[in-house]
Image: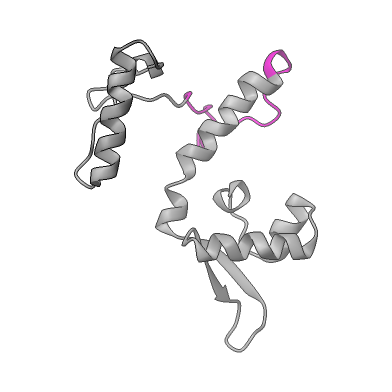
Amino acid sequence: MREALVGATRFSDFQRSLDMARNVLTNRLEALCEAGILSKHPQKEGSSRSFYVLTPKGSALFPVVVALGQWGDKWIFGSEGEPVRLVERMTEIPLQEITVATETGQTVTPADLKLMPGPGAEPSTRKHLKKMQNACHNGTGSK
């Protein structure tokens, strides 16, 4: 995902950057295509070579990939500092740390969360959420 998000499109781009066996890379790219995260297109009409393009679903993973990278920079690399700094292309200003916030911009921590059924919740989901809420209120579970 990281490679696709920064512009890799050809199999050789992915392989050169990731340094993995062709069969493993082929399987991973196929899985990303099957999941609708990448789409595969022939380089030229009638060509057996292909290129890969992020779909809107794949592009939507951008904040997730950045957040995981920022987590690794803090908790894995720590005092050594990040091995790669993400900056905005034109200004070279580093990205702000990704946080979770309410619609009004208030930062939220896990302790601030409450799970509620959404409009697509099935009865089993509603039952599970009710059970979790009761366990938390009775002191038998964590928040």
Residue 116 is situated, as x and y percent measured from the top left of the image, at: 24, 31
- Residue located 56% across and 33% down the image: 68
The foreground one among 49 and 89 is 49
Does 13 sit left or right of 106 as displayed?
right
Above or below, 79 against 133 in this view is above
**What residue appears at the point 42 percent right and 55 percent down from the top-left corner?**
57
Residue at the spot 42% in from the left edge and 48% down from the top edge = 60
Q: Which color scheme does this rendered protein use? A: one colour
Say if the magenta span includes residue 92. Answer: yes
Q: Kindly tell me whether residue 6 is visible in this rendering.
A: yes
Judging depth in this view, the residue of 100 and 34 nearest the camera is 34
Residue 95, percent from left and from top: 50, 28
Taken as a whole, is the magenta stretch helix, strand or loop?
Answer: loop
Residue 80: image quadrant is: top right
Question: Magenta segment, which residues?
Answer: 78-97
Nearer-the-camera pick, 120 or 137: 137
* Picture coordinates of residue 131, whole percent (x, y): 30, 28
Indicate yes or no whether the magenta region holds residue 21.
no
**Image position, residue 74 (x, y; %):** 62, 19
Image quadrant where one finds the C terminus: top left
In this rendering, the answer to whether 92 lies above or below 47 is above
The reply, left or right, for residue 16 in relation to residue 121 is: right
Q: Is residue 121 visible?
A: no
